[in-house]
Image (cartoon, rainbow, N blue to C red):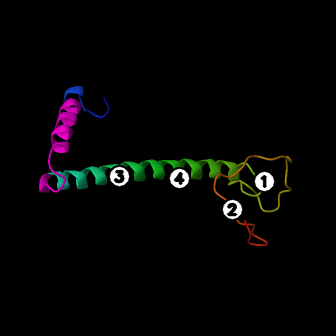
Amino acid sequence: MGDGITGEELSAFHRTVGRLRRLPADDPVRLHAEHVAASFARDGQARRRRARGEAASAADAATMAATATGSPDRREDAPLAAPGRPGVFHKARHCYVCKSA
């Protein structure tokens, strides 16, 4: 299992969830457990969303660095070299002239 969670601990968790499901819907213990579970699910969703966003930003930064004008080691007076299309951005960029996407 991941990060120190054993199969036995996971089985105990499933047994506990099974016991919580048998409680009445308005039981305070069940309501607290539902709140904790919802928080756990939201945390997982936020982490996955953040990881996807970071991956897209890193890919966009690599695409920008591959362009003639976005390269970090570019000289201002140097001519543009190597025509071609380096890639496609994952996040839309606005045109710096007309300001439209």
Which amino acid type is marked by label 3? Asp
Which amino acid type is marked by label 2? Arg
Residue under pointer 2: 93
The mark found on residue 68 in the picture is 1
Residue situated in front as seen by the camera: 75 or 56: 56
What's the residue at 25%, 33% (across, down)?
5
Residue under pointer 4: 53
Give the foreground label among 1 and 2.
Answer: 2
Give the foreground label among 1 and 4.
Answer: 4
Give the foreground label among 3 and 4.
Answer: 3
Give the foreground label among 3 and 2.
Answer: 3
Residue 41 image offset from top left, x and y in percent: 34, 49
What's the residue at 85%, 54% (across, down)?
80
Q: How many marks?
A: 4
Q: Secondary structure at mark 2?
A: loop
**Separation of residues labelled 1 and 2 (CA atoms):** 16 Å
Residue situated in front as seen by the camera: 80 or 58: 58
**Separation of residues labelled 3 and 2 (CA atoms):** 29 Å
Q: Secondary structure at mark 3?
A: helix
Which amino acid type is marked by label 1? Ala
**Separation of residues labelled 3 and 4 (CA atoms):** 15 Å
Q: Residues within 10 Å of mark 2 (few under 14, many from 20)?
A: few
Instruction: Name the outermost residue toward the top.
Output: 7
Residue under pointer 3: 43
**Separation of residues labelled 1 and 3 (CA atoms):** 40 Å
